[in-house]
């Protein structure tokens, strides 16, 4: 395990090397940009459902996920943001090693500039992901068969959970061990502003997060939890549950419906709330550039 500090630009960050799968990384964080340090905001690119294939020409409904990430990665790399998060379905369908090598290649312009935290979706394969991405942004938690990461930035803390059950099986599940870990973690992190990230949607269908009610029993009373960011549905939407904001990030790979944008979201977080700007690169681009402001529950 080694700690690496990128001095090549002013977005200095610490990135951790997890060594082999299962090893635990030490503390890593998104360092504030000097220009933003005064108001302690955290400025991130939020992506979801990249669905990167091994075959670069693979397409669905006329969308080319490989080309879409190439475009978005160029935009994110130039954005001056401090970091990025991808909420799963990184790979096209079955999490093949070739999918992840393409993902890694496409993300290179971004990883040269900023740390990226990633969650796993139902089209990912944990072992193949961990073989391709041996470095972890943030602190990897010691959970068996789950990839859970905590990233700190002054008072803001990102928790990246693992809702993946089995590769290419649609529903999601956190499971008892992860829920117990979250309970303990929130008890000892009461002073933070906590934002949670995972892949699955939180409806009541058989293809959503199956233990969502048990998740809300845990996070509902912990007022430091302000928002959940997720993907899965390939829909861009804002909702709330128990005053916790639920932000459904747009898919980058392809949409299932012509009304939905293809793209990513630029987010600026602080202790009080967040501001979000849609960067639509395909699909329905009518709301490209549209801003949304959210105030956190107190
Ligand atoms: Zn997806």
Image: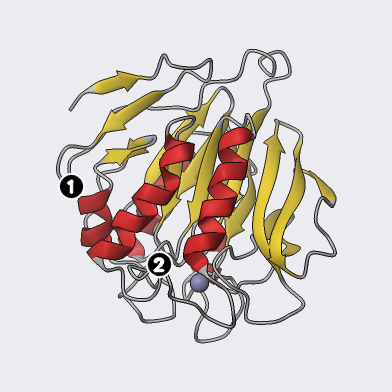
By what rule are the colours in the image chosen? secondary structure
Q: Position of residue 276 (x, y in %)?
A: 75, 46
For label 1, count other residues whose C-alpha is less than 10 Å away and answer few (under 14), some (14-19) or many (20+): some
Instruction: Say which residue appears at 67% left-offset and 21% top-offset.
Output: 40
Residues at marks 1 and 2, CA–CA distance in whole angstroms: 30 Å
Tag on residue 56? 2
Q: Of the residues under marks 1 and 2, which one precedes in the sequence?
A: 1
Tag on residue 33? none
Instruction: Please state if 101 lies on the left or on the right of 287 as rendered.
Output: left
**How many numbered circles does the render carry?**
2
Residue 111 is drawn in which quadrant? top left
Q: Quadrant of the C terminus?
A: top right
Q: Which residue, given by chain and number where applicable, does mark 1 sit on?
A: 22
Q: Quadrant of the N terminus?
A: top left
Q: In front here: 200 or 125?
A: 125
Instruction: Say which residue appears at 59% left-offset and 65% top-offset.
Output: 251
Instruction: Say which residue appears at 43% left-offset and 16% top-offset.
Output: 8
Q: In front here: 276 or 202?
A: 276
């Amino acid at each position: 395990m080694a700690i690496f500090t990128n001095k090549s630009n002013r977005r200095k960050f610490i990135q951790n090397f997890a060594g082999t799968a299962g090893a635990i990384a030490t503390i890593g964080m998104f360092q504030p940009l000097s220009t933003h340090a005064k108001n302690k905001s955290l400025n991130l690119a939020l992506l979801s459902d990249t669905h990167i294939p091994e075959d670069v020409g693979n397409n669905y409904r006329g969308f080319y996920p490989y080309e879409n990430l190439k475009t978005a990665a160029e935009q994110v790399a130039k954005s001056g943001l401090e970091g990025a998060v991808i909420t799963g379905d990184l790979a096209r369908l079955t999490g093949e090693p070739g999918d992840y090598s393409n993902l890694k290649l496409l993300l290179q312009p971004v990883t040269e500039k900023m740390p990226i935290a990633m969650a796993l979706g139902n089209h990912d394969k944990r072992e193949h992901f961990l073989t391709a991405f041996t470095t972890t942004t943030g602190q990897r938690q010691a959970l068996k068969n789950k990839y859970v990461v905590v990233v700190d930035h002054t008072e803001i803390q990102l928790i990246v959970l693992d809702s993946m059950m089995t590769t290419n099986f649609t529903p999601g599940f956190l499971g008892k061990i992860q829920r117990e870990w979250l309970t303990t973690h929130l008890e000892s992190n009461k002073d933070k502003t906590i934002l949670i990230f995972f892949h699955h949607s939180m409806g009541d269908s058989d293809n959503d997060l199956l233990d969502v009610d048990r998740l809300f029993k845990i996070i509902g009373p912990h007022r430091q939890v302000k928002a959940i960011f997720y993907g899965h549905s390939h829909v861009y939407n804002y909702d709330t549950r128990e005053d916790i904001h639920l932000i459904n990030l747009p898919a980058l790979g392809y949409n299932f419906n012509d009304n939905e944008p293809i793209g990513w979201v630029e987010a600026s977080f602080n202790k009080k709330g967040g501001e979000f700007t849609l960067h639509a690169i395909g699909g329905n681009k009518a709301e490209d550039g549209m801003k949304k402001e959210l105030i956190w529950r107190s």
